[in-house]
Image (cartoon, grey):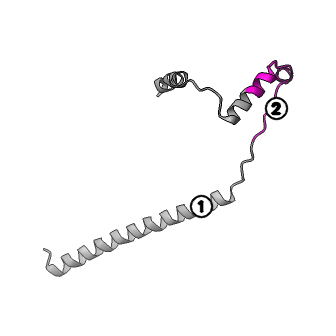
Amino acid sequence: MTDAISNTAANAANALKSATRTSEATNKAKLDTADAVETAATSPKVEPSTVELSPALKAALSNADFDSAKVEAIRTAIEQGNYPLDDTKIAESFVPLEKLL
């Protein structure tokens, strides 16, 4: 048999338990967040990596053939805004990329 008083007391006890659980969960989340921030702040910094080229690649790069006059002409045309752009070729180069999506 339950009366209004004991029912109210049981409801209050359940509410208190629920509030305690919620408070504990909130505090745990705050601690986890603080730990994550502290870990991020104290973690070692990642330095940029270096890549060492193989001797064969170094030799290939040192002997690379290119037309320096043509490179200079293209560089000058780009700087002056006279380098011709083919809109169709540019658009066609996007087609394979779009197919990957």
Dot 2 or dot 1: first in sequence order is: 1
Give the position of the N terminus as an image quadrant.
Answer: bottom left
Q: Nearer the viewer, residue 94 or 48?
A: 94
Question: Gap between marks 2 and 1, in whole Å?
Answer: 35 Å
Q: Is residue 26 magenta?
A: no
Q: Amino acid at mark 1?
A: Val
Q: Nearer the viewer, residue 90 or 21?
A: 90
**In terms of image quadrants, where is residue 83?**
top right
**Residue contact at pointers 2 and 1, CB within 8 angstroms:** no
The label number, if any, that marks residue 16 in the structure image:
none
* SS state under label 2: loop
Q: Is residue 45 left or right of residue 1?
A: right
Q: Which residue is mark 2?
A: 52
Residue found at the very far bottom of the displayed protein: 5
Q: Residue at x 79, y 20 (%)?
A: 67
* SS state under label 1: helix
Q: Residue at x 81, y 28 (%)?
A: 53
Residue 87 position in % (x across, y down): 53, 25
**In terms of image quadrants, where is residue 26?**
bottom left
Residue 11 position in % (x across, y down): 24, 73
Q: Is residue 18 above or below residue 46?
A: below
**In terms of image quadrants, where is residue 13?**
bottom left
Q: Which residue is mark 1?
A: 37
Residue numbers of the magenta segment = 49-73
Q: Nearer the viewer, residue 79 or 47?
A: 79
Q: Is residue 78 left or right of residue 2?
A: right
